[in-house]
Amino acid sequence: MKRYCGTRMRDAASACIQMHGGIGTTEEYELDRLVKRILMADMLFGTVDMHTNRLGQLIAIAARKEAETFGLEIPA
Protein backbone atom coordinates (compact mmCIF):
# COMPACT_ATOMS: atom_id res chain seq x y z
CA MET A 1 0.00 0.00 0.00
CA LYS A 2 2.81 2.42 0.88
CA ARG A 3 4.54 1.61 -2.39
CA TYR A 4 1.42 2.31 -4.44
CA CYS A 5 0.45 5.50 -2.59
CA GLY A 6 3.98 6.83 -2.33
CA THR A 7 4.64 6.34 -6.03
CA ARG A 8 1.32 7.89 -7.04
CA MET A 9 1.77 10.87 -4.69
CA ARG A 10 5.16 11.72 -6.13
CA ASP A 11 3.93 11.28 -9.71
CA ALA A 12 0.91 13.50 -9.08
CA ALA A 13 2.97 16.22 -7.41
CA SER A 14 5.51 16.16 -10.22
CA ALA A 15 2.77 16.36 -12.86
CA CYS A 16 1.12 19.29 -11.06
CA ILE A 17 4.37 21.22 -10.89
CA GLN A 18 5.04 20.52 -14.57
CA MET A 19 1.50 21.49 -15.55
CA HIS A 20 1.71 24.79 -13.68
CA GLY A 21 5.17 25.60 -15.02
CA GLY A 22 6.99 25.55 -11.70
CA ILE A 23 4.35 27.59 -9.84
CA GLY A 24 4.14 24.77 -7.31
CA THR A 25 7.57 25.65 -6.05
CA THR A 26 6.51 29.12 -4.90
CA GLU A 27 5.10 29.66 -1.45
CA GLU A 28 1.99 31.58 -2.53
CA TYR A 29 0.26 28.49 -3.84
CA GLU A 30 -1.31 25.50 -2.10
CA LEU A 31 0.66 23.13 -4.33
CA ASP A 32 3.88 24.15 -2.57
CA ARG A 33 2.50 22.96 0.77
CA LEU A 34 1.29 19.68 -0.73
CA VAL A 35 4.68 18.95 -2.27
CA LYS A 36 6.36 19.69 1.07
CA ARG A 37 3.94 17.32 2.83
CA ILE A 38 4.78 14.56 0.38
CA LEU A 39 8.50 15.05 0.95
CA MET A 40 7.97 15.14 4.72
CA ALA A 41 5.93 11.92 4.62
CA ASP A 42 8.85 10.19 2.91
CA MET A 43 11.26 11.51 5.54
CA LEU A 44 9.06 10.57 8.48
CA PHE A 45 7.65 7.23 7.36
CA GLY A 46 10.29 6.00 4.93
CA THR A 47 10.59 6.09 1.18
CA VAL A 48 8.91 3.71 -1.22
CA ASP A 49 12.24 1.94 -1.78
CA MET A 50 12.79 1.43 1.95
CA HIS A 51 9.37 -0.17 2.34
CA THR A 52 9.88 -2.34 -0.74
CA ASN A 53 13.23 -3.61 0.57
CA ARG A 54 11.76 -4.32 4.00
CA LEU A 55 8.85 -6.21 2.50
CA GLY A 56 11.29 -8.29 0.44
CA GLN A 57 13.27 -9.11 3.57
CA LEU A 58 10.15 -10.18 5.44
CA ILE A 59 9.03 -12.39 2.56
CA ALA A 60 12.50 -13.99 2.39
CA ILE A 61 12.44 -14.71 6.14
CA ALA A 62 8.97 -16.26 5.87
CA ALA A 63 10.05 -18.36 2.87
CA ARG A 64 13.10 -19.67 4.75
CA LYS A 65 11.00 -20.63 7.76
CA GLU A 66 8.47 -22.35 5.53
CA ALA A 67 11.22 -24.22 3.67
CA GLU A 68 12.72 -25.38 6.96
CA THR A 69 9.46 -27.11 7.82
CA PHE A 70 9.94 -29.27 4.70
CA GLY A 71 13.64 -29.85 5.37
CA LEU A 72 14.76 -27.57 2.52
CA GLU A 73 17.44 -24.92 2.66
CA ILE A 74 17.19 -21.59 0.83
CA PRO A 75 20.50 -19.78 0.33
CA ALA A 76 20.79 -16.29 1.79
Image: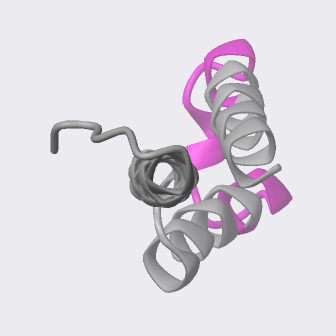
Q: Residue at x 72, y 64 (%)?
A: 28
Which of these two is toward me, 12 or 29? 12
Image vertical order of residue 50 relative to residue 17, above or below = below
Residue 18: x and y in percent read 62, 17
Q: Quadrant of residue 34?
A: bottom right
Which residues, given as a range, are shown in magenta? 17-33
Along the line of sight, the residue nearer the viewer: 12 or 22: 12
Q: Count of labels shown?
A: 0
Colour logic: one colour
Q: Horizontally, is 1 left or right of 69 in the view?
A: right
The residue positioned 17% from the left and 37% from the top of the image is 75
Which residue of the protein is positioned furthest toward the bottom in this rendering? 44
| Residue 40, placed above or below residue 38 | below
* In front of the other: 24 or 7: 7
The image shows residue 36 at horizontal and vertical percentages of 59, 67
Taking the view exactly as shown, the residue that stands out farthest to the front is 71
Residue ID at (44%, 76%): 43
Residue 42 image position (x, y, % from top left): 52, 66
Residue at x 65%, y 61% (from the top left corner): 38
- Quadrant where the C terminus lies? top left
* Residue 66 % position (x, y): 58, 52
